[in-house]
Every structure is written in structure tokens, then in C-alpha cells.
Image: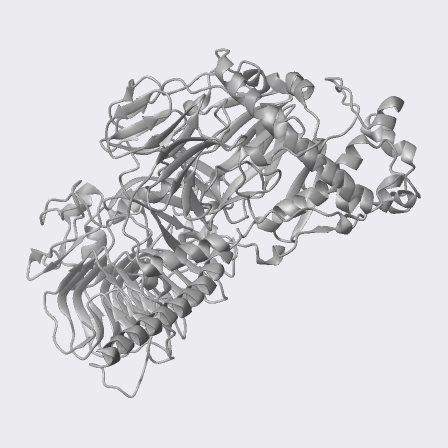
């Protein structure tokens, strides 16, 4: 209720009491958050926002009360002018989601205490004020000495156990009083951790004239942190303070477990008003009214139902003694962090029964908890970036992130995380209504919902091996795994162990580990890098090397395939839009690609030849508007289309750096003038389009490179092993160079046949690039690199390991020695923040500390390779393009309606 004049025996359970102005309101409802005026976002209470009559025998249990930026918020009453009797606010669910919060005047029982007595109340609310005045019982007490003694605000017979924090003026009982207290303020117990970011904080309260409560008991391990200082215990703060029975006394955990500690301080703690049997079960006294224990104070059972009265199965825990010198609660430590933002999680599949929670940073002063069906499954301090869960991909999850003061809730929607197309070993798969369809093995019947790395998961939680139909697990349970599972795992050049996650990669070399904010990918013994901040689907990638051609094709968030390097070959009449899922090729030995469209249709094809392998068409009635929208989408280029153009430019620089032992020619590389064809994403081309009259056959190259690509290690069973017997954690496939040499004969044959056609295209493209390079005048002249670097050409050549003289003349590289390569290799990386393609020395990229990693562009002071339209490449771009398309669609639809109306009118006139 908002404002009321009568309340008696009212109870509110498991509710969110807020306003439409809270940002989280929009998350819960999907409605836009309104901007309040100064008088709107206020007066929020678990029982009432504001009241003119004293509530009696009321309780609030496990409720979230408040709103961001709100004033006058209380666990029971937001603004009281008459007081409160026999009330409680209790949190037994141990969830960071449950709290009393707002901006100014926030209290565990009452936010703004204007008049009347608050007596026989108790609370363990987490009280949080982003502004001023937060208290465990009252946020702000307005003292008006002109009022008579029955109306002046007073506190009597209350206790508080919990955490209080505020920008300033935080107190365990009262946040702040406007003047000296008046009348009898007594018989109070406080066990609080109090944090004030400003200069005003007190375990009891910020009172004018000092602490003038009588019969006050303070828990000796209560903590106070003011202005970001470490927490100080009450036992130290009040060590020299006089302690008397009628005044203030420190009490221990043992004393809080003794009924006489309470009953000795007055009638409000008499046995008729409090139930002390709970002390035997390590719970603070239950509140009684008219001699009977009030309901809903004793927590819930395993099914979420509130325990019966006097069951003693739950309640407000008695504070426990800290072990050693450890602080009993984390919050004061967290307050010293100075308001750091909470780590933000992302969720993605890393197995048919595995889910990763990946944070954007590590903060050991924060924690996350995972909830399912209102039950907390586990809680963990955020001490690393990634955590892996065993997951059934059916149960929705809620992940709560908190630092003890602030919290944020995230929803895990399993339908959004499932994958339903797959390439694995030498086969390809997709989910149908009847089961999993294989390109070679046929249909595996079952109600499958998720595919990953050769395994499938059914709706009932069975984990199945797709290659032979074997059931690997009968039921997948939701648990936190001991070992973290990466998205991909590679061994590269025998010396580097690479673990790639959604937004970063870890490289281990000689016992040292470096981290890069890139997806590092290895295929056919070649390393590629992909910036995860691009608007792409995280696992929708094709990375391959065939002869001299390098492929890096991704699925953009706009539903289009885009080539970031060489162009793959699409089937004739291929629709490159409205694609929602795409298989990757990092666990397959064949050049297969499977895509699923928004309408459910599936197409599988060979991306080197354009041969269509399988299709599953879903027929759907399409309205005129939908047809027009689809037509518009087909005409709009991918948001990543210009990156292929930039790649052609950077490869000219890459090839010059690779084959030149002398740095002088680099000074004359004008990369802005390198001409690269704008591909518009990836182009619809059939295999017949790849050859040009006069091109020579590349059969010799094919024979030399046939064995470069091989079948990668497949996962075997639940744990998985590599082909040489090495186990990999949690079924993560280890992709090694040795694995690639053991490709199946089927994979070799298919890819070799494809190369015979693709290499004709390679020669044409290389010839075109050569003409572009020649036209811009890339030649060996000048010595500007000496000026840029301050080093001689001889020094730079020695740094690279040297290049034989005959290689300098021909531009051909012999195989580098395993221990020390003769020349460096370079990795092109597009940086969406600057809109530039950068080139990194491979060794530096894999080994250099982050602070010393610099691009070749910067080191040699070369002209930047700026990608046309790169400023518009961000996560919001697909929405912008769609908005423009919708406007055009509306205009087209309007024109059609006008035409139809005109024809109808004309027909009527003729009649």
C-alpha cells in the first residue's frame, strides 16, 4: 500500500516494492524507465510508503524494498509520523538481491522518522543509501523539541543485526538525527557493520551531542569504516568508554546467546515480547505479539515454503566470532575499493553439457551467486575471469553479482545459448524435429536441444555421442566445475599452449603466461587473431589456409557472413542474410559449413568449392511486408564488409615485411594507396567463376600443400582424449599441429579436390594484388626507416634472424629452422576502437608483456591502414541499419497501399 491510515497484523513476503523510476524496473518488466521529478521517486516501504497511524504487529520477509535515487525508504515504513510497534523486517534467503536501498533517508524499519515511538522492532536488512542517512532502524530522525513528549520521535526496545552503508551519515541504529535526542531512547541492541564513504559514520548513530542512548548493547565485533579506511572493531572504538548496566556495554557472541543479556535491559525484551528458545538454535530472539510468536520469521524449507511458527529452523543468525584476525563480514573491506564497478558476466556454451560464465574483470572483493527456481545453487568470490558450470540447457538461471553494497542481476536464458548446427571430424550435423541429422550417418532419433563438439544434449538431460549414439550421461546436473574449460585449446609450434575464451586468450610459453584481449585461433599450423569486440557471433567463424590463401570468415550480428580475409565460395542463389547460427571449422577435417536461418531452414555446403551438400527448407507464409523487409536486407552490405578491403591492404605490408631483410624499403610503403577490392561482405560466386582465361594450373602447389590440413582431435566420451592418448580437461578438444598431420583420408581427398579449384582463384587474386602493389610503387628505395627507427637495416635484419641472399632476390622463403626462424611472421589484427588494421610480430604477440606490446605499424611509423566506414562498426550498427531499412520498408508499404486504394476506387468508378 502507498499511504494508509490503519495497519494491523499485515505481512508482506517475497516481493519487490519499488517504483517505475528504478533502472531494474525496466529489466523486470521490459518497460522503459521514466525520469522522475524531485517529488516523485520517494516514500517506499515494505508495508506502506507513508502512514498516519502506527502499524502494529506487522512484518516484511525476504523483500526487496527501494529504488535507485529514491528518498524516504524503510523496511516497513518509508515516512512515519506516528511511530511503529512490534514490527520486523527480516532477510532469511541470504540473497544479495534482497535489501532496503535508495538515495537519502533509508532505514531498516523506517526511512524518515518524523514523530512517534518505534518500539519492539527488529531488523537484519542490508541498508544501502547512495546519498545520506542510512540506519539499521531509522534512516533519519527529525527532532522537533516543540512537540510534546508523546509525539517526539524515540527509539525503544529494538535490535538490529546487519550491514549499513551510505555515501555519508551511516549508523547501526540511526543514520542521523537533526538535533539532540529527546525523551527516553533506550534498550537497544546493535551488531552492525557500518560503512560511510564520507566522514560521518558511527556504529550506533550520528547523533547531535554524542551517543545518549541508555541501556545500549553493542556487539564487540561490530565494524566501522569511514572515508574508505579499513574497518575498526567496536571493541577497539569503545575500549576506553565507560561501560555500565544502565549505559553502554559491549557484548560477545556468547552473551548474545544468553537470554539474560536481553531481559535485563527492560520490558520490551521480556519473555512475553520475545521468544528466546531460538537462542538454542543460534538465532536471534523471535518477536512476539500478545504472547505468540509472529509468523514468517523462521525461514523457508528446501521447497521454498515458510517454516511453521516455533519450528526454530531459521531466523536472524546470531553473529559468530571471527576466526583469528579475520573480519566477520566482507562489506567493510569492499568499501575500501572506492566504488569500483561490479564485474559484468557473459554466458556462452563450451560443451554439450558445459556453460561458461566469463567476467570482464577480476575483483576479489566481489562475489557471484547462481540461482535456479528461487534456490541458490552456489556462491563464489570472483577471483578469476571464467567459471565453468555443468549445465542442462533447460533450466533458466539467475546470476547475482555483488560487492556487499551494490548488486546486479543477470538472466541466463538457455534457448539463446544452445547451438543447433555443427561440423565435427569429417561430418556435419543439424537438429531437426525428429532428432539430429548427419550428412553421412543419417538420422539419430531423439528430442535434441543442443549440439557441441560431437555430442548432443536431449531435453531430458541425456548426453549422447553423435558419432555412435552412445549415451555418455543419463542426466546432467547443474554444478560448478573444478576445472575451467576454454572455448578452444591449441598447441602451437610445440612451444605455445593457447587457451581461447570468448573475449580473451591465454598463452603459456616456458612457464610464463600472457593474456591478450583477442581470440587466437590455430588451423593448419597457422595462427589467426580475431578481435572479440567486433559485432560478430562469438563461435561463428571459419579459419583456414589453403596454399597461399588465408580465410577468416565470420557471422556478423546482423545475420550475414563476412570475409575478413580471402573470400569463401558460396553456393549459387545462397541467401546471405537472416542467418542466426553458423558452424565453425576448428574441430573438423573437411571444408564444410552449416548455417541455419531465422525461419529454421538449413544449408550445408563446401566453402572452398561452393558445392551445396544438404538443405532443409522450411516453408512459411510470407506477408508482403516481410517480403519487402527481406528484400531490403539482401541489398544491405554486412557491417563488416569493408574489413576485407582493409585486409588486402595490410597483406601487402605483411608480405613486404616477411621477405625483406632490409628495412629501408619499408619507409616507402604508402599503405593508404594499396588498392583492395571491396567485397561487400562475402560474394555469391560459384566454382565456375574462379578461373580466368590464361591462368596456369597450380597442381604442383596442390601436391605440396595437400598434407597441410588434417583431421583434428575429436572428443571421446565425457572427459575426451587427444589421438595420441593425452587427456584433456572436461572434454575440451586439444588442437595440435601433430593432430593436423593425422587427418583422415576422406578429409584429405575432399580438401585436395577443393584446392585444385581454389588455387586458380589464388593466382588471379595474387596477380591482382601484385598489380595493385606495383601501381602504388612499392620498391626498394630510400632510408627513411633509419630515421623512423634510429637503427640500421643490418640491425633489423639481424633482429629477424637473417634471410639468405637468394631468398631476398626471389621473395621465396625456405622452411625456417625449428629452434630459430629465419624471418618473423606477422599477424594482422583489426582494431575496432581505432578503425585500423594493425600488424603484430607473431613472437611478440605470443610472448611480450602487455605493456611492451606494440604493433609493427607503430614501431616503423608507417601510414595507418584505415578501413573505410570503420567508425560505424560497433555492436549497435546492425540496429541502425535495420532502422533505416524499416523506414524505407514503411514508405514502400505505404506506396503499395495507396496504389491498391487507387485501383479499388478506379474499379468502383468503372462499375
Q: With respect to residue 71, does 232 lie above or below?
A: above
Q: With respect to residue 157, does 424 lie above or below?
A: above
Position of residue 261 in the picture relative to residue 700 (left or right):
left
Q: Position of residue 354 (x, y in %)?
A: 37, 32
Quick one: quadrant of the N terminus? Answer: bottom left
User: How many numbered dots are placed on residues in this image?
Assistant: 0
Q: Residue at x 58, y 28 (%)?
A: 522
Q: Quadrant of residue 450?
A: top left
Between 147 and 388, the one nearer to me in the picture: 388
Q: Position of residue 775 (x, y in %)?
A: 81, 46
Q: With respect to residue 168, does 774 lie above or below?
A: above
Position of residue 911 in the picture relative to residue 794 (left or right):
left
Given the current orientation, which residue lies at the most extreme top position? 724
Between 570 and 697, the one nearer to me in the picture: 697
Q: Is residue 514 visible?
A: no
Position of residue 822 in the picture relative to residue 556 (left or right):
right
Q: Position of residue 838 (x, y in %)?
A: 70, 44
Between 358 and 271, the one nearer to me in the picture: 358
Q: Is residue 208 visible?
A: yes
Amino acid at each position: 500500500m502507498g499511504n494508509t491510515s490503519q495497519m494491523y497484523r499485515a505481512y508482506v513476503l517475497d516481493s519487490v516494492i519499488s517504483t517505475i523510476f528504478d533502472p531494474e524496473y525496466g529489466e523486470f518488466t521490459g518497460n522503459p524507465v521514466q525520469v522522475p521529478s524531485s517529488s516523485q521517486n520517494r516514500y517506499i516501504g515494505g508495508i506502506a510508503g507513508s502512514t498516519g497511524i502506527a502499524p502494529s504487529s506487522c512484518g516484511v520477509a525476504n523483500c526487496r524494498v527501494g529504488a535507485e535515487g529514491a528518498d524516504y525508504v524503510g523496511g516497513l515504513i518509508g515516512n512515519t509520523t506516528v511511530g511503529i510497534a512490534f514490527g520486523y523486517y527480516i532477510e532469511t534467503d541470504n540473497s544479495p538481491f534482497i535489501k532496503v536501498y535508495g538515495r537519502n533517508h533509508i532505514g531498516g524499519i523506517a526511512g524518515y522518522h518524523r514523530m512517534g515511538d518505534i518500539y519492539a522492532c527488529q531488523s537484519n536488512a542490508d541498508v544501502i543509501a547512495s546519498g545520506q542517512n542510512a540506519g539499521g532502524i531509522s534512516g533519519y530522525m527529525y527532532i522537533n523539541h516543540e512537540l510534546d513528549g508523546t509525539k517526539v520521535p524515540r527509539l525503544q526496545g529494538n535490535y538490529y543485526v546487519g550491514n549499513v552503508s551510505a555515501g555519508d551519515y551511516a549508523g547501526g541504529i540511526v543514520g542521523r538525527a537533526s538535533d539532540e535526542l529527546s525523551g527516553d531512547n533506550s534498550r537497544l541492541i546493535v551488531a552492525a557493520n557500518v560503512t560511510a564513504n564520507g566522514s560521518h559514520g558511527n556504529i550506533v548513530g550520528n547523533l547531535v551531542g554524542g551517543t545518549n542512548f541508555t541501556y545500549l548493547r553493542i556487539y564487540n565485533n561490530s565494524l566501522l569504516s569511514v572515508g574508505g579506511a579499513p574497518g575498526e572493531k567496536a571493541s577497539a572504538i569503545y575500549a576506553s568508554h565507560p561501560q555500565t548496566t544502565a549505559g553502554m556495554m559491549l557484548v560477545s557472541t556468547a552473551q548474545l546467546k544468553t537470554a539474560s543479556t536481553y531481559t535485563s535491559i527492560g520490558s520490551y525484551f521480556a519473555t512475553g515480547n520475545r521468544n528466546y528458545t531460538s537462542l538454542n538454535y543460534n538465532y536471534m530472539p523471535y518477536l512476539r505479539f500478545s504472547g505468540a510468536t509472529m509468523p514468517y520469521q523462521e525461514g523457508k524449507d528446501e521447497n521454498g515454503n515458510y517454516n511453521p511458527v516455533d519450528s526454530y529452523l531459521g531466523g536472524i543468525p546470531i553473529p559468530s566470532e571471527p576466526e583469528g584476525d579475520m573480519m566477520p563480514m566482507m562489506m567493510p573491506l569492499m568499501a575500501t575499493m572506492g566504488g569500483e564497478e561490479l564485474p559484468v558476466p557473459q554466458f556462452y556454451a563450451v560443451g554439450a553439457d558445459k556453460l561458461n560464465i566469463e567476467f570482464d574483470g577480476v575483483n576479489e572483493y566481489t562475489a557471484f551467486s547462481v540461482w535456479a527456481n528461487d534456490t541458490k545453487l552456489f556462491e563464489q568470490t570472483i577471483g578469476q575471469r571464467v567459471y565453468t558450470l555443468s549445465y542442462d540447457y533447460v533450466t533458466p538461471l539467475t546470476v547475482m553479482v555483488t560487492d556487499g553494497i551494490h548488486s546486479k542481476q543477470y538472466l541466463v536464458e538457455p534457448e539463446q545459448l544452445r547451438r543447433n548446427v555443427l561440423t565435427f571430424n569429417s561430418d556435419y550435423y543439424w537438429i531437426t524435429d525428429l532428432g539430429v541429422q548427419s550428412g553421412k550417418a543419417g538420422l539419430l532419433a531423439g528430442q535434441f536441444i543442443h549440439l557441441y563438439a560431437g555430442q548432443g544434449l536431449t531435453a531430458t538431460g541425456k548426453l549422447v555421442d553423435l558419432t555412435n549414439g552412445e549415451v555418455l550421461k543419463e542426466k546432467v546436473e547443474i554444478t560448478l566445475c573444478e576445472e575451467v574449460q576454454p572455448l578452444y585449446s591449441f598447441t602451437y609450434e610445440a612451444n605455445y599452449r593457447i587457451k581461447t575464451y570468448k573475449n580473451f586468450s591465454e598463452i603459456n610459453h616456458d612457464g610464463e603466461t600472457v593474456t591478450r584481449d583477442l581470440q587466437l585461433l590455430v588451423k593448419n599450423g597457422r595462427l589467426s587473431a580475431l578481435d572479440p569486440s567486433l559485432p560478430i557471433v562469438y563461435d561463428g567463424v571459419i579459419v583456414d589456409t589453403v596454399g597461399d590463401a588465408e580465410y577468416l570468415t565470420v557471422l556478423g550480428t546482423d545475420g550475414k557472413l563476412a570475409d575478413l580475409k580471402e573470400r569463401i565460395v558460396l553456393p549459387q542463389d545462397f541467401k546471405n542474410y537472416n542467418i542466426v547460427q553458423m558452424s565453425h571449422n576448428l574441430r573438423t577435417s573437411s571444408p564444410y559449413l552449416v548455417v541455419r536461418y531465422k525461419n529454421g531452414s538449413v544449408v550445408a555446403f563446401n566453402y572452398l568449392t561452393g558445392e551445396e551438400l544438404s538443405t532443409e527448407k522450411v516453408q512459411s507464409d510470407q506477408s508482403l511486408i516481410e517480403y519487402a523487409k527481406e528484400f531490403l536486407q539482401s541489398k544491405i552490405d554486412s557491417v563488416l564488409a569493408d574489413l576485407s578491403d582493409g585486409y588486402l591492404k595490410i597483406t601487402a605490408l605483411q608480405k613486404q615485411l616477411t621477405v625483406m631483410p632490409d628495412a629501408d624499403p619499408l619507409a616507402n610503403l604508402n599503405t593508404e594507396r594499396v588498392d583492395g577490392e571491396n567485397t561487400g561482405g562475402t560474394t555469391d560466386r560459384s566454382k565456375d567463376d574462379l578461373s580466368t582465361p590464361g591462368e596456369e594450373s597450380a597442381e604442383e602447389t596442390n601436391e605440396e600443400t595437400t598434407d597441410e590440413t588434417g583431421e583434428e582431435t575429436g572428443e571421446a566420451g565425457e572427459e575426451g582424449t587427444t589421438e595420441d592418448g593425452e587427456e584433456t580437461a572436461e572434454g575440451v578438444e586439444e588442437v595440435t599441429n601433430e593432430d593436423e598431420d593425422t587427418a583422415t583420408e576422406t578429409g584429405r581427398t575432399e580438401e585436395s579436390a577443393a584446392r585444385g579449384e581454389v588455387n586458380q582463384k589464388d593466382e588471379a587474386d595474387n596477380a591482382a594484388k601484385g598489380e595493385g602493389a606495383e601501381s602504388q610503387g612499392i620498391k626498394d628505395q630510400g632510408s627513411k626507416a633509419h630515421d623512423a627507427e634510429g637503427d640500421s637495416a643490418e640491425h633489423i635484419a639481424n633482429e629477424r634472424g637473417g634471410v639468405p641472399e637468394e631468398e631476398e632476390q626471389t621473395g621465396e622463403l625456405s622452411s625456417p629452422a625449428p629452434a630459430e626462424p629465419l624471418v618473423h611472421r606477422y599477424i594482422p589484427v583489426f582494431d575496432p576502437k581505432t578503425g585500423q588494421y594493425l600488424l603484430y610480430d607473431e613472437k611478440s604477440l605470443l610472448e611480450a608483456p602487455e605493456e611492451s606490446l606494440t604493433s609493427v605499424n607503430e614501431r616503423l611509423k608507417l601510414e595507418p591502414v584505415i578501413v573505410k566506414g570503420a567508425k560505424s562498426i560497433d555492436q549497435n550498427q546492425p540496429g541502425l541499419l535495420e532502422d533505416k531499412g524499416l523506414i524505407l520498408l514503411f514508405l514502400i508499404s505505404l506506396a503499395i497501399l495507396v496504389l491498391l486504394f487507387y485501383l479499388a476506387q478506379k474499379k468502383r468508378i468503372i462499375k
